[in-house]
Amino acid sequence: MKNELYSVLNDFGKENIQIEFQNNINSSIPKIKEILSKTIATIYEKKENIDSDYNNFEKSLSILCEAFLHFLLTITSLPSQRKIMLNELKIDLVIPDIKTLYKDPKKTLIIKFDKDSSTIEYIKKLDNIQKIKENIWIVSATPLEINYRNYVIYKKIEECQILFTNNMIIDENYNNYLIDGKNEINKKKHNNIHNINPNVIPFFNIIVDINKFLKDTQYRGFKFVT
């Protein structure tokens, strides 16, 4: 999946994306949507890359989002630390860094990517590290049954999954991909979504929201941390 992602990024032009996002980070929302949609469509076209177990394929989409977010953080020069071991727990991503987490948890995000069946139990352990529940963000292919901010790619509609573009409606002007249990893509329109959990947010918004969090917490010295 990472190969397909970077192939699409190369088609868009990595430097062009970097310049655009640094000039106007809000432009990242439609661009991320476009890039991720094309990447997933490319993966579906290459049938051999699709896991026969659809649930496992959903988990692998979270890994795709992780790789994409690492790229986005790099080109926007937003601070982060990755793959941190803390209290014998592997942390996927800390914003801005582990030092700030120790010093002031209110100014620190922990981002977890839903990669396997252990996610729910893992989140409970995160509560012991980041006491501020609002500062634990979970990225998954579809909404999880959790009371945390949850960034998702798809919203489940009956037996299908549709690209989740905002908390109120599906963008009628955009070709949304409906994916059924047979791993087939159909370009369709769909009615408005109702009863959306306010904690469920489109993944496309995540870099804008990270940037806003850092501004709101008055973080200084935007420097990427390896």
Image (cartoon, grey):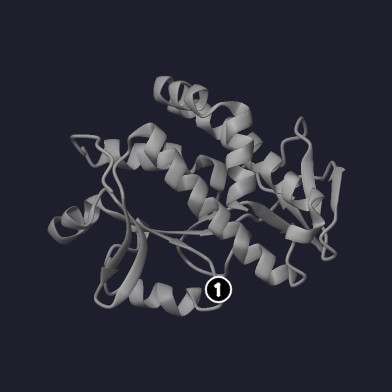
Q: Amino acid at mark 1?
A: Asp
Q: Residues within 10 Å of mark 1 (few under 14, many from 20)?
A: few
- Which quarter of the figure has residue 39? top right
Secondary structure beneath disc 1? loop
Residue sitting nearer the eye, 74 or 146: 74
Residue sitting nearer the eye, 207 or 105: 207
Query: In the displayed structure, does residue 73 sit left or right of residue 197?
Result: left
Residue 172 pos. (x, y %):
77, 34
Q: Is residue 169 visible?
A: no
Q: Which residue is mark 1?
A: 116
Residue 192 pos. (x, y %):
76, 45
- Residue appearing at x 72%, y 41% in the figure: 170
Q: Is residue 68 above or below residue 53?
A: above
Q: Is residue 108 above or below residue 14?
A: below
Q: Is residue 130 above or below residue 8?
A: below
- Residue appearing at x 45%, y 80% in the figure: 121
Residue 63 pos. (x, y %):
54, 59
